Image (spheres, rainbow, N blue to C red):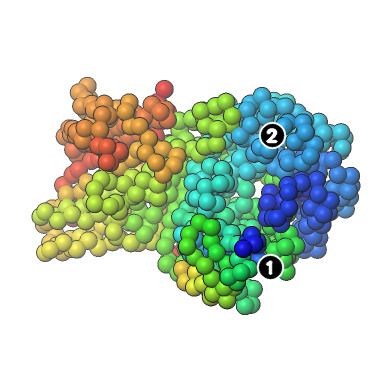
Amino acid sequence: MEQLVLNLIHRPEMVPEYAEKVTGHGKTEDIGRKALLTESLDIFKTQQEAAHKNGLKVTIQMTYASLFNDEAVALAKEHHEKYGDEIALSLLGLPCREFREKYHTKDFCIWMFSMEDKKEIVNDVFEKFHERFGFYPESTGSYYMDAELTNYIKEKYPMVKCAVATCWEEGPKAYHTCNNSWYTLFDGGPWAPWIPSKQNTHAPAANEAEDSGIVAIPHLSRDLIACYDGNGSNFGTHPQNVLRGMIYDSKTWEYPYLYNLIDQYRALAKYNNGYAYNMMFVGPGWMNKMGRWEAPYELLKKSYEDGCAYYGQLKKEGKLLDLTMAEFADYYREKKHYTEPECALWRDILYGSDKQVFWYCDPFLRACVNMDQGGAIVDLRPYAAKLKWEVGIGTKHVQDASYPFLIQEKYRAGYFTHYAGEGTVRSAKVCYNGEEVDLCLCRTKAHFSEETSADGKVTRILTLDPVEIEFDGLTVTLQTKEYFAEGSGSIKIERTILKMSDPGAKVEINEYMVACYGTTEYPEDMTGITLTCQKGESAERISYEYKCREAALTGADEVSAVIPAIETKVSLTSDSEAEGYIREGYAFSPIFTLGYQKTMSEREVFATWLNLEKAN
Amino acid sequence: MAQSGKGKLNYRCPSCFLRDLDIDMFYDKDKKEYYCLRCQYTGTEEDILKKNEMIRFRYRAMMDRFEKFDFD
């Protein structure tokens, strides 16, 4: 039976991230204020009550600060006994007088500390937890957990099996929304639970050797269209985030969007062997008595209670399974195997556009296919490289924990650019008598299916509705199918010309990929990238120098780019006799292009593969 | 002129919100208006509430309840 699995998490945060800054306005900073501590604990109690009265089990993530509070510890013990709540340990909520006196810093994000400090803090909080409860926690988490941190925790505290390890697409967009003052830069990860690799948290493990030993869950379940474009913190299973986005009727205080979001996640079971997942985790700062922005306390509280009530109703109807994090880790390992992907065919549920995208994530790649752009790939992360990317003080990336992209339509244009240059996208152009139409302009919809080969391997297939391309004197009906073969690190794209108004006509098709690399909106140095057009023993090569050069070979076996900065090789291959080409960019257009061109007739099929590998 | 403070609720600048920026506004008691520290927006509570309604123009399906999530 299809079920939505829910992880509901609360943390008694004695100094909520927002509360001191917002409600303490006009007062000198005092994180030990009694009023603040009392209010924080009251919010935790309110949240616990909302969950329990709806029959939902909670994972209580004790914060460092709460471990010094007898009442918080007693409550956790009581609720563990009474409701079966799991007592876990969060690496959020570090700030408190004790922490500041000991570490002499106001830093509070575990992934940003030096490795030495990470170890010391982990030892400190885990031992403090043990001192208070007499056992070590099985679950932990933060907004982000870097691989080195997870590996250390797993080595020192092997009983840990589950962790909140990233917020989906919380990166430059969230940073921007907070007036460039909220440094949670970790785009490029999975949106649903996964087993992180030992090398990089974002990239799922491909096998036991790569397995970090934990099951990771995302911080919230986020809208897979709205969050990719806008502020992630407006569109997730966090009722107050929906209020933050002003996605409610200000008179009636209704927010059907929240329920649509939960229901769309439920619908993803169809693409994931009957399994779907939600995570709700609201920090107490979002329910303080002063209200939050234009939302008064009563609305904040109502939204949380409504969220819990909806999950509770689904549970009563047998459509939801509430698990603690540790229980979920066991469930997940039982349910999924390493190379099994997470798939999400997602529609717009907010803007009224009917736009549809498909997200795919496995240990080798994460991709987004945009049906509003004819099935173009508009985001691509090469997990095959399993890039070692240390973060925190003392590393090359103090804050930037994002997994690099090859294609990102928001940070590197996409199909539409201004006046000059090209944006990153994987699409195709169809040409006839000097006219050219990019499939990015052919809006369509997709349907999901699966195919199992003789060796038991499953391929997920997207079949797009055919599109019509109108040239002067010729109409072409073309269909796209995209194949994601499990464990292959490749995406096969197949174009079929179903019909032409002149059955004897011939058109040119240009399958192309414009790419670069980066983690932010700003360009990176492309020097050092090598583009290769290979045919048997002969090859044309371009070492990237922004010189706008190009090369082509008829019947090329492969066209590729090796990007040393992200240890990635990306290539296109084809099984037809087609001309492969490579194109270097220039300073105003710091991208490269790989492609294949071919003449096609009616009923002909042309397939190309996009392949990702680690380049050492 | 006395310093500005926060109002009874902590309104954000509607103009900045439209460009995906959450910027708290401050209240100027003398001029009886909220103002944005980042941009040039100023307005009364009434004007802010009106603009907050306008902001929702992009959420055309905000009040719809969906039952189907595919196009099969």
Q: Residue at x 60, y 38 (%)?
A: A195
- The numbered mark at residue A603 is none
Q: Position of residue B23 (x, y in %)?
A: 55, 58
Q: Amino acid at mark 1?
A: Lys
- Residue A493 visible in the snapshot: no
**Real-space Cα separation, disc 2 to disc 1, in angstroms:** 33 Å
Query: Which quarter of the rendered picture does the N terminus of chain A lie within?
Result: bottom right
Query: Which quarter of the rendered picture does the C terminus of chain A lie within?
Result: top left
Looking at the image, which is closer to me, A387 or A98? A98
Q: Residue at x 41, y 44 (%)?
A: A521
Give the residue at mark 1.
B8
Q: Position of residue A449 (x, y in %)?
A: 44, 53
Give the residue at mark 2.
A105
Q: Position of residue A97 (x, y in %)?
A: 79, 39
Residue A355 position by quadrant: bottom left
Circles 2 and 1, Cβ within 8 Å, touching? The answer is no
Residue A288 position by quadrant: bottom right
